[in-house]
Structures are given as C-alpha cells and as structure tokens.
Amino acid sequence: MTRPSVIGNRIARARKLRGVTQQQLADALGIDRASLSQIETGRYSPRADTIRKLSDYFQLPIGDLFFNPTLPADRDRDSLSLVPIVIK
C-alpha cells in the first residue's frame, strides 16, 4: 500500500509541475488550503471525492496519480496538458 506521504508528494509534484499554488488547487477542489497542505505532507489522507477531483483536475488516471512511481509528467513533460481544468 502507498504511504500517505508518498501520495502527498505526488500531488505536490503534479501541482508544482503545472505552476499551481496550493490556494488555487484547494479552491478548485473545494477544500481549505490547510487541508491540502496536510494532504501534501502526508498528515491527512484525501477523501474519495477529493481523490476523484484531483484526478479530474490533473487529467490523470487515479492509478497514475496515486500509485505509479513516476508521474507521466516526470517521464515526458510534453505528454500532458499543463493547463488545469476547473471543477464545478
């Protein structure tokens, strides 16, 4: 099983690769910035609906975002759109 700190590091890396602040991502997900910070540092595990929103936001399958040792963006930065989408 993947540790929460590893998952959080992947979320932080995906966010930073796209040039998105914690506040911008938190707003798009509908959560507090402090909650996102706790997810990124591994102190808090995201809820199922937050996991889905993260997957939608980064346009990555849940498996890639949470369980793949390297994000597709790490292998090929041109393979992903770097424009975040807005989740309603």
Image (cartoon, rainbow, N blue to C red):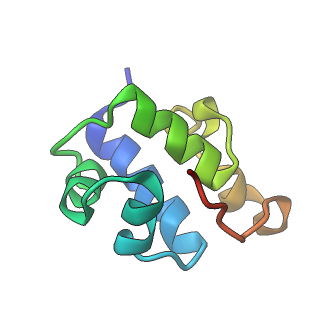
Residue visible at 63% across and 44% down in the picture: 56
- Quadrant where the N terminus is found in the figure: top left
Q: Is residue 29 above or below residue 47?
A: below
Residue visible at 79% across and 64% down in the picture: 81
**Residue 2: percent from the left, percent from the top?**
38, 28
Give the mark count.
Answer: 0
**Residue 17: percent from the left, percent from the top?**
58, 71
> Which quadrant holds residue 26?
bottom left
Q: Is residue 39 left or right of residue 88?
A: left
Residue in the foreground of this view, choosing between 46 and 40: 46
Residue visible at 15% across and 45% down in the picture: 43
Q: Residue lying furthest top in this view?
A: 1
Residue visible at 28% across and 45% down in the picture: 5
**Residue 40: percent from the left, percent from the top?**
30, 55
Q: Is residue 34 above or below residue 83?
A: above
Residue in the foreground of this view, choosing between 62 and 3: 62
Q: Is residue 87 left or right of residue 79?
A: left
Q: Is residue 51 left or right of residue 72?
A: left
Q: Is residue 28 left or right of residue 26?
A: right
**Residue 68: percent from the left, percent from the top?**
59, 36
Q: Residue lying furthest right in this view?
A: 79
